[in-house]
Image (spheres, rainbow, N blue to C red):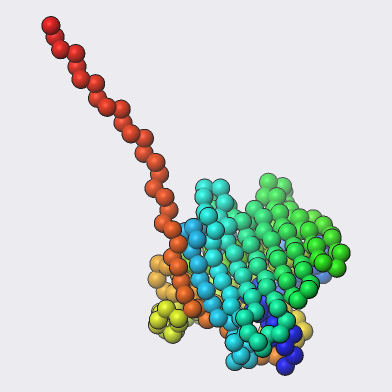
Amino acid sequence: MNPRSLACSLAVLLSVPVAPVAALAADVGLDPSSTTTAGDARVTSIDSTSFVPPSSNERMEFTVSYLGITLGKASLFSGKVDSITAPIFMQARTASIAAIVTLRQQLASYVDPATGLPRSGQLDAVEGSYRHTDTFTYDRTASPNRATVRERSSTGKDETRSFDLPRGTIDFVSLVYRLRHMKLEPGTTYTFHVLTGRILSTAVVEVVGREELSTGIGKLQTLKVRVPTAFAGKFAEKNPSFVWLTDDARRIVARITTDFAIGHATASLDSYTPGEPAAAPAIAAEPAAKTPASTP
């Protein structure tokens, strides 16, 4: 196995789960590998599911292994959450002599805490001396909605493209956080439009069942959720990808797995930090009661 392929799998494991469908992209600016279009009339599950923003500085840490080799570390975490923005992040980095190629990747999604819809986002990737940054902005007021993607790299590439989106389109990071507060009974399915880079696809998420997992924070009762990917070539799925969420109010991501055509990759939970509780709203102090004037 090429060590460079091992390094690349670290980013691939946690980056772009979306599901292929029959439609072909026709919107100008979308990647040709898109599997749906802005005119896709299928109903998504945005309206029937809720988004609960995470606590500020909540954090989940993972060890990533590939073909049984410990390759690196990954994190899911939130920044400072307020009434305007809930910043959520997915980060991966090599941390093994087997990797050889230094790789770091961070996906950031800045979502509206009331709706869970991304307002903007950014992908930063480092692979050796190569740097790549994609920025995303969304116009939810336009009809149809629109996205603008700017792609820049250390090779000199700098391209900006805009295209239409189906209403309620989200990204992968906000999808994971939405899953954490959805009703996840075995057999339930949900459908979402997901934008990854310039690839617009429809993800059909299915709750498979319940399982007990051994993790870095002990044994956990979990819900196993199938989240398909649209990888092609040597990173095409051999079997579906899965996310395990704890079957409790915390809904911690306990494990993520993907079986590629060239091997099996797993992100296993090492630690969990619950974050800061929401600040109580300020209550104005009542003015002190005036003492009635004495009667002469």
Q: Residue at x 73, y 53 (%)?
A: 146
In the orientation shown, which residue stands out farthest toward the left? 296
The quadrant where residue 174 appears: bottom right
Residue 207 visible somewhere in the drawing? no
**Residue 80: % across, % down:** 53, 55
- In the picture, the quarter occupied by the N terminus is bottom right
Q: In screen coordinates, is 269 left or right of 220?
A: right
Q: Tally the marks.
A: 0
Above/below status of 110 relative to 127: above
Between 211 and 39, the residue placed more toward the observer is: 211
Q: Residue at x 44, y 74 (%)?
A: 246
Residue 252 visible somewhere in the drawing? yes
The quadrant where residue 292 appears: top left
In the orientation shown, which residue stands out farthest toward the top? 296
Between 97 and 36, the residue placed more toward the observer is: 97
**Residue 37: % across, % down:** 75, 63
**Residue 181: % across, % down:** 47, 64
**Residue 263: % across, % down:** 66, 90
Q: Residue at x 64, y 75 (%)?
A: 93
In the orientation shown, which residue stands out farthest toward the right? 156
Q: Residue at x 73, y 55 (%)?
A: 147
Q: In screen coordinates, is 21 left or right of 172?
A: right
- In the picture, the quarter occupied by the C terminus is top left
